[in-house]
Amino acid sequence: MVSRARRLVAPTLLAVAVALSACAASTPPVTPEPPAGAPTGDATKAQAGAQVPSAEPPKAPEAPPQDTAPKPSADAPKPGQITMDDDDGCTKIAAAFEQKARPKIKECYREGKKANAALEGSVRITLQVDGFGKLGQAKAQEATLPDAVVKCMVKAVHDTPFDDASKCKRKGITLPIQFPSK
């Protein structure tokens, strides 16, 4: 009768042999490095009569092109242009909404000018219209105006009635605002 240990020896040895052969095939053979200061095969050929390269200084690499910044695409929004997610007639509705909000936005700017006569800057206010046609939270992005002015403008946009929001379901609206106007 063969013991259980002897029955497991053959399959175990086979598995180890397969694993070792797989590992051995995947690594390249190791070539020993010559000791420091010893001539390499290329160096001995050069000493045997081949011409030695001239001692010219290496050339400096060419400078990369100066204009490496990506250029904006032709359909990228221009400053002051309302942008929409998936426009299907919503741009006109959003433009009318922006015209309604504009007097309140200008009032926020006038209030900011009282504190800083040289006030200028920009902000992008984004709005989401949900699937029920309800206006979501207004948010400021890329603001260069003071926080108090930006908060006033965001509140003004959010508080402006968006009568036709139901026609712009699941849309994002971006209102770019620049002061002074260009």
Image (cartoon, helix red, strand yellow):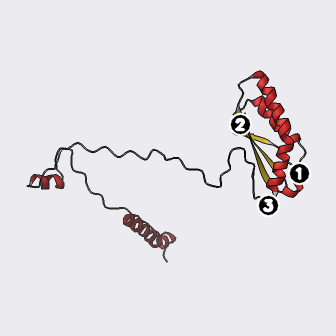
Horizontal side of 170 relative to 49 (left or right) equals right
Measured in 3D between alpha carbons, the distance from the residue under mark 3 to the one under mark 2, in whole angstroms, is 27 Å
N-term mark: 3 or 2:
3
Q: Which residue is mark 1?
A: 134
Badge 1 density bin: few <14, some 14–19, many ≥20, Cα 10 Å: some
Task: Identify the residue at the far front of this view.
Answer: 182
Q: Which image quadrant is residue 155 in?
A: top right
* Picture layout, residue 144 above or below residue 9: above
Q: Is residue 158 visible?
A: yes
Q: Which residue is mark 2?
A: 122
Looking at the image, which is closer to me, 177 or 168? 177
Measured in 3D between alpha carbons, the distance from the residue under mark 2 to the one under mark 1, in whole angstroms, is 26 Å
N-term mark: 2 or 1:
2
* Picture layout, residue 146 above or below residue 182: above
Q: Which residue is mark 3?
A: 88
The kind of residue on which mark 3 rests is Asp
Q: Secondary structure at mark 1?
A: loop
Q: Residue at x 82, y 45 (%)?
A: 98
**Which numbered mark, 3 or 1, is in the foreground of this view?**
3
Q: Secondary structure at mark 2?
A: strand
